[in-house]
Image: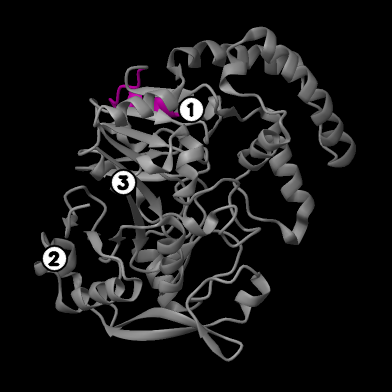
Amino acid sequence: MSAFIVLGAQWGDEGKGKMTDYLAEEAEVIVRYQGGNNAGHTVEVEDKQYKLHLIPSGILHDEKLNVIGNGVVVDPVALFDEIEYLEKEGIRVTPEKLVISDRAHIIMPYHKVLDKLKELARGKNDIGTTGKGIGPCYTDKFERCGIRVCDLINKEVFEEKLKSNLEVKNKYITQVLGGEALDFAEIYREYSKYAEKIAPFVKDTSVVVYNNIKEDKNVLFEGAQGMLLDIDYGTYPYVTSSNTTAGGVASGVGIGPNMITNSVGIAKAYTTRVGKGPFPTELENETGEWIREKGHEYGVTTGRSRRCGWLDLVILKTAVRVSGLTSLVITKIDTLAGLDKIKICTGYKFNGEIIDYFPASLEDLAKCEPIYEEFDGWDESVAKAKSFDELHENAKKYLNRIEELTDTRISIVSVGPKRSQTIRVKEI
């Protein structure tokens, strides 16, 4: 059997959608284990581009089973909008292709209202959330007042929980945040319709995934966001509300960690992040702008421009350690083609010492000075390479150095957005 994780090894936007789609050809089951529709995965198949937010990338393969695990928070509005979008594009989405955990929590309208109002109240100290209700939904989950999928499809339970929650939420929205109260009847009527629509897709996905692994099926776990947005190991508080590291799989799906055989980290050949938060290797100059425009570095979900900088191996080493990465996938090496000189951050100078780990304190991180190695650049020929040997010599030196410094092998190199622009270096 092979049960492997594909996760982002930076701040997200590393190309997980493309790589999940590519690796899904070898998998029979593709599982999302955390996050919600705040994620954005872009997949290009031949000349067609698909933008996914909640549904696993394996949905583009007609014969694959796709699973939304209990660690995911589900917005029914976004879910069925995405299903409608996919079906218009000729992609079937049926209960035979997609199953949703009965334990997954539901994003309600008050979660989205709270998300936006609380972010507004933070003023200049805002976190930069997507406003999609992800954080408030996870808050209710841990406050033990959340509405799960199994609650939504039980009319009596849903009515009782919605009434109870809305009474508390409306007081907070109106009296503390200065917003307008939400109407119980309107929400109950709308979400009762979603309950009917979602019911055929609902299963105990822990059982589904476990049985598929025991039957020697290849199972791929697809992460959303990136390692440095993890609620525990990310640049807190500028993080997401779930565990984006490999540790999130066991709890977010309901299987034992001993069933996972490999963990694959996806990283760009440079570094990007969206929104606020520290970024030691950020290039706030013409080079950073050049990378942004050439790499089309704009968010799939928000459309916000991404901040760009040199590859930071302190981040990758942290990902290797925390998520037990067994191999790396390096994407967008074609974006750097055309630069005369390219740099890699190999460590930080902090209080007179050299460190190669990511400090927890943002105040300490602000004092860290990146230490760089410089490389000669390469030309546009990398985008046409079909094998590692066909890559420009300078690109090969760059990749070999990444392997050496992270002590982790590179299994795949992506030289463009299409499936065909993928070089398999080593088996996963």
Q: Where is 213 relative to 352, above or below?
A: above
* Residue 58, quarter of picture: top left
Q: Where is 155 relative to 236, above or below?
A: above
Bounds of the magenta span?
A: 82-94
Whole-angstrom CA distance, mark 3 to mark 1, is 30 Å
Q: Residues within 10 Å of mark 1 (few under 14, many from 20)?
A: some
* Residue 50, quarter of picture: top left
Report whether 303 appears left or right of 424. right
Report whether 20 appears left or right of 390. right
Pair 2/3: label in front: 3
First in sequence: mark 2 or mark 3? 3
What amino acid is at disc 2?
Phe
Q: Nearer the viewer, residue 251 or 47?
A: 251
Q: Which residue is mark 1?
A: 79
Q: Is residue 299 visible?
A: yes
Tell me if residue 212 is in the magenta stretch.
Answer: no
Rendering coords of residue 9 (x, y %): 41, 59
| Mark 1 secondary-structure assignment | helix
Whole-angstrom CA distance, mark 2 to mark 3, is 25 Å
Q: Which residue is mark 3?
A: 261
Q: Which residue is mark 2?
A: 388
What amino acid is at disc 3?
Thr
